[in-house]
Image: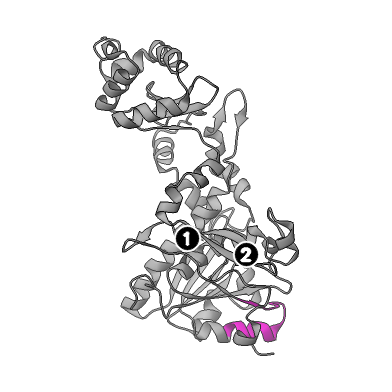
Amino acid sequence: MDSSQPLKNIRVLDLTQVFAGPYCTYQLALLGAQVIKVEPPGGEMTRFGGALPELAKQGLGLSFCTQNAQKNCIEMDLKNPDHVTKVLDLAAEADIFVQNFRPGVARRLGLGEEALAAVNSRLVYCSISAYGEVGPIGHRPAYDHVVQAMSGIMSTTGTDEMGPVKVGAPYIDYATGLNAAFAVMAALRQRDLTGEFQLVDVSMLDTAMTMMANNLVTVATTGEDLPKLGNEAASRAPSSGCFATQGGDLLMLAANNQRQFSDLCEVLGHPEWVQDPRWAEPRARAANQDALRALFESVFLSKSAQEWETLLDQAGVPASRVRKLSETVAGGQLQARGLLHRLPVGDDATPVSLPGIGFRLNRASLTPDRPPRAVGGDDAAWRSD
């Protein structure tokens, strides 16, 4: 087997929409699985959104392209019993079935785990939902920003002055997709060991909580909520966090251990601060952090964020100028990692940069080589009316 295609010969039936579910099956496709995406008549909603209207008009909007390259796309009306039967026929030949309907909907459609197990006793059946298949709020629908509110992540983001703030990107959606792909891989391995049907239940809320595991453990253990940190580091060390610099750019710094603190003071031109009893060791620094922070702030204003980043990098102190996303995209690191791959999309072969998988396997990046398909683009191959 090709080492860059560990899921070669694995077939996935994908009944997911929007971000979390499609991102899960996109990971499987990048790993070599054959993914058959089943969409409602006319295609899923994300086909018609995104930053390039000309692609959205063709049902190939960037919101869809982001996590749907490398897949075969077919249309099915799941309110039509004949089409449900066709989905079951496809599932009988699949290894993995993924759906992200609200709990109970798949069962009402005739596509619950019992129906799927009856046609394929070796299937990995994955359900992705907002809050999971059980629990007092398991029935509720949600999107990323709603789960950000429910999970408590917003309560620790922002400042007391501005109030709770959501994370800009739909990070819970994409983290849930990764979590689901991880769970499916574990279930696939278990299926291969036992030969038995596997049921995977992935929730956005579970994912959000585990993505802030340290906060979760602290609050669940102490019963006390955490303060809003704004741009400060989770360590709350006075030598970590965000600092204004000359020219207005911000510098994010993380000098958490003793060596980093000593090297930071050296770069700032004040090695004597390390010897000051108020700041000689971490507990003392925490007790006298306001005075130390004020000294840092005054010195950082003497140079630009980029100058400080260069000097601190040379000293081995983690630091970065706060960049715009466009700067990071153009910065060279993503290109060196092979994270993005440009493919021609739509009638005019519009070049679209699509993400590869978020790691390298055997020193290679795994990226899509087939652009997203039009609505029903593979109907002829995968369904017969």
* Disc 1 secondary structure class: loop
Q: Which mark is residue 17?
A: 2
Q: Is residue 85 magenta?
A: yes
Which residue type carries mark 2? Answer: Gln
- Taking the image as drawn, is residue 152 in sight? no
Which residue type carries mark 1? Answer: Gly
Q: Quadrant of residue 338?
A: bottom left
The residue lying furthest to the bottom in this view is 384
* Disc 2 secondary structure class: loop
Residue 375 as seen in the image, left or right of residue 188: right
Q: Rounded to the nearest whole Å, what is the CA distance between mark 2 and mark 1?
A: 19 Å
Horizontal and vertical percent for residue 169?
A: 58, 46
Q: Quadrant of the C terminus?
A: bottom right
- Classify 169 as above or below 232: below
Q: Nearer the viewer, residue 8 or 139?
A: 8
Task: Give whichever of discs 2 and 1 has the lower sequence position.
Answer: 2
Q: Local crowd at mark 2 within 10 Å, few (<14), some, or many (≥20)?
A: many
Q: Which mark is residue 356?
A: 1
Q: Local crowd at mark 1 within 10 Å, few (<14), some, or many (≥20)?
A: many
Q: Which mark is residue 79?
A: none
Identify the magenta region: 73-88
The residue shown at (53%, 58%) is: 132
- Classify 47 as above or below 282: below
Horizontal and vertical percent for residue 343?
A: 56, 65
Q: Quadrant of residue 360?
A: bottom left
Q: Nearer the viewer, residue 336 or 218?
A: 336
- Taking the image as drawn, is residue 115 in sight? yes
Horizontal and vertical percent for residue 214?
A: 39, 39
Q: Is residue 44 magenta?
A: no
Residue 31 as seen in the image, left or right of residue 25: left
